[in-house]
Amino acid sequence: MTMTKADIVERIYEKVGFSKKEATEVVEAIFELLKERLEQGEKVKVSGFGNFVVNEKRPRKGRNPQTGQEIVISGRRVLTFKASQVLKKTMNGGSPPSATGSAT
């Protein structure tokens, strides 16, 4: 099952008690803020969830697999997400790490 932006709006509407219009505005504002920061190349850290990081890929040499001709693959920006230890543990059925940082 896939969760959509509409599903997130619905859950906020149910849990927080905002109107659907207010919940939509909140979700849109959050995603717009995240997008703006990532476009600027900033790291976005959501405590207990994970980090969104924009990495720069340099141009590199490659080959066209059909012709064997050498080509240059242009540089680009890629977005990566790394889940926090808390989220990883939760996903795997464990309890989140303690606040003291000691491993269990």
Image (cartoon, rainbow, N blue to C red):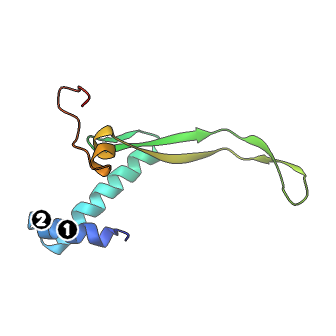
Question: Which is nearer the eye, 47 or 43?
Answer: 47
- Residue at the image position 91 percent from the left and 58 percent from the top: 67
Residue 31: percent from the left, percent from the top?
A: 33, 57
Q: What type is the residue that disc 2 sits on?
A: Lys
54 on left or right of 35: right
For mark 1, what is the residue? Answer: 11
Residue 71: percent from the left, percent from the top?
A: 83, 48
Question: Which is nearer the eye, 87 or 54?
Answer: 87
Question: Which is nearer the eye, 41 or 78?
Answer: 78
Specify the quadrant of the image occupied by residue 51: top left
Q: Quadrant of the N terminus?
A: bottom left
Mark 2 Cα-neighbour bin, 10 Å: few <14, some 14–19, many ≥20: few
Label 1–label 2 contact, CB within 8 A: yes
Can you see residue 66?
yes
- Residue at the image position 8 percent from the left and 67 percent from the top: 17
88 on left or right of 74: left
54 on left or right of 18: right
The tag on residue 15 is 2
For mark 2, give the secondary structure: helix
Mark 1 Cα-neighbour bin, 10 Å: few <14, some 14–19, many ≥20: some
Q: Is residue 32 above or below residue 57?
A: below
Q: What type is the residue that disc 1 sits on?
A: Arg
Residue 5: percent from the left, percent from the top?
A: 32, 68
Residue 28: percent from the left, percent from the top?
A: 30, 63
Q: Is residue 59 above or below residue 19?
A: above
- Residue at the image position 26 percent from the left and 62 percent from the top: 27
Q: Quadrant of the C terminus?
A: top left
For mark 1, give the secondary structure: helix
Can you see residue 24?
no
Q: How many angstroms separate mark 1 from mark 2 (CA)?
A: 6 Å
